[in-house]
Image (cartoon, rainbow, N blue to C red):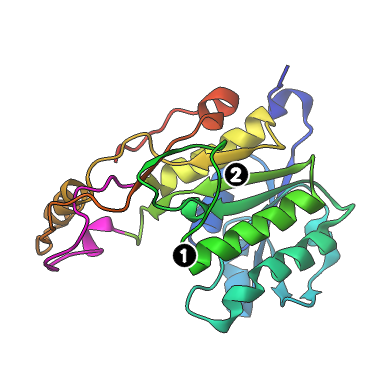
Amino acid sequence: MIQDNKKDGSVKTVSILGCGWFGLAFAKKLIELNYTVKGSTTRQEKLEILQAEQIQPFLVNFTAESIVADTTFFETDALFICIPPKRNSTELLDYPNKINSILAAAKDKSKHVVLISSTSVYADENKTVNENSETIPDTDSGKVVLAAEMLFKELLPKKGTIIRFAGLIGPDRNPGRFFAGKTDIPNGLAPVNLIHQTDAVGVAVKLLEKQAFGRTYNACSPNHPAKMDFYVEAAKTSGLAIPEFIAEKKNWKIVESLNVPEYLDYEFEVGI
């Protein structure tokens, strides 16, 4: 039987490697829930921001070869790795090696390790995919993310957990801006796969509360409106120029989760 961490006290301290758009929001929520949170940044000036949120700040810099960090950052009940690959950079291909360096630093220090990944590991093969589906990415970023996942599973076959986020929207990521004013946008009838920041944080919190480690989770809203319907409405809501889509359905996928409802019992708060 999976127990709540508030009862058995086994998850009290959480380290978040990468307090960016998702990581910082997640850290703030955990502080609100009375967890002890260690947060990392690569920028000296951000340490004060973390401290102001009652997050224990750590400066952590890493390359494909090494990590420069206070080792106490990795001494934690649960380590969340929240560093997406840099898409427009020569560093893209270094991403799996960075994950390898992080896991080496966390070895024998972090009780549980969670890799924040992406649904880009699934190709647009005109079908519904879930955690049991084959992963054949069709983008460069998807390929390096999958390589990192495979390395992660190899090194942590039992205690590693993967959360694959769909497209992230929310504060400072207003979907109304994505296509505002553009015309002849292809694939307008393709379904969208998105998750709001509130639910991304909610899924991660639920993982801790349920202690449902050791699995892969697709974190994606169960709502999949057509791209043209969603983005036109988002632009209207934001008072932006209405985009024009081509009413066609070419390459697409629908990302669903079997494990989020079964093991986390999470109910999405924000509709798409």
Query: Which label is found at residue 139?
Result: 1
Q: Which of 263 and 69 is in front in this view?
A: 263
Quadrant of the image for the C terminus? top left
Q: In this view, does 189 lie to the left or right of 87?
A: left
Q: What residue type is labelled 1?
A: Thr
**Element type at marker 1?**
loop
Residue at x 36% of width, y 53% of height: 170
Give the extent of the magenta segment.
174-192
Percent across and percent down for residue 134 are: 55, 44
In the rendered image, residue 188 lying in the magenta stretch gets the answer yes
Judged from the image, the secondary structure of the residue bearing numbered disc 2 is helix
x, y percent for residue 174? 29, 58
Q: Mark 2 points at which residue?
A: 30
Task: Identify the residue at image location x=82%, y=58%.
Answer: 106
Q: Which of 82 and 36 is in front in this view?
A: 82
Position of residue 111 in the picture relative to residue 46 (left or right): right
Which numbered disc, 1 or 2, marks the residue closer to the eye?
1
Question: Which residue extends farthest right?
Answer: 108
Residue 107 on the magenta segment: no
